[in-house]
Amino acid sequence: MFDFFKIFRSDKPTVLVVDDEPNIVETLQDRLEMSGYHVLTAVNGEEGLEQATKESPDVVLLDIMMPVMDGLDMLERLRQTSNNTDIPVIMLSACSQAQDIARAKAFGIEDYIVKPFDLGELMVKIDSVLEKRKTLASV
């Protein structure tokens, strides 16, 4: 019976939102679901890594400053897991320091967006990342 639900939602792209700020998670989840995405959420890097490993989302929106495991550590571990090396990641963070951006880019992120961000612009970037991934998969 539960397989039915997995099959039912499999046609929707899955976005994993990893952020410890409830307002951001709720806003992103609402907007993404209204736009036809299946949304998974996690409140820290450890939960995010578990979700990413278990569900293999189509894209991850990842904050840096979080409890338990920060986003950069999650990203590093995600890239070390053989079946998750190609999951596109968009960083969403209040950290605008060059070393944080450089470290994230070293792990092959798709984009780095500094908070506060424009929700419409973020949606365009997510669509673009997914279209790029779809094009590469069909080659």
Image: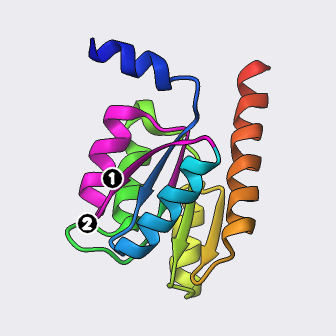
Marks 1 and 2, how far apart in space? 9 Å
The residue at 45%/16% (across/down) is 7
Residue 20 in percent (x, y) is at 32, 71
Sequence-wise, which precedes: disc 1 or disc 2?
A: 1
Mark 1 falls on what kind of element?
helix
- Residue displayed at 73% across by 66% down: 120
**Closer to the camera in the image, 7 or 89:** 7
**Local secondary structure at mark 2:** loop
Q: Is residue 66 left or right of residue 88?
A: left
- Look at the image and give the residue range highlighted in magenta: 36-60
Across and down, in percent, residue 13 comes to: 58, 35
| CB atoms of marks 1 and 2 within 8 Å | yes
Nearest to viewer (mark 1 / mark 2): 1
Q: Which mark is residue 69?
A: 2
Of the pair 68 and 8, the residue shown nearer to us: 8
Which numbered disc covers residue 48?
1
Q: Amino acid at mark 1?
A: Gly
Q: Bin the neighbour count of mark 1 within 10 Å (Cα to Cα): few under 14, some 14-19, many 20 and up.
A: many
Residue 69: x, y in percent?
A: 25, 66
The answer to whether 113 is drawn above or below residue 124 in the figure is below
Label drawn at residue 13: none
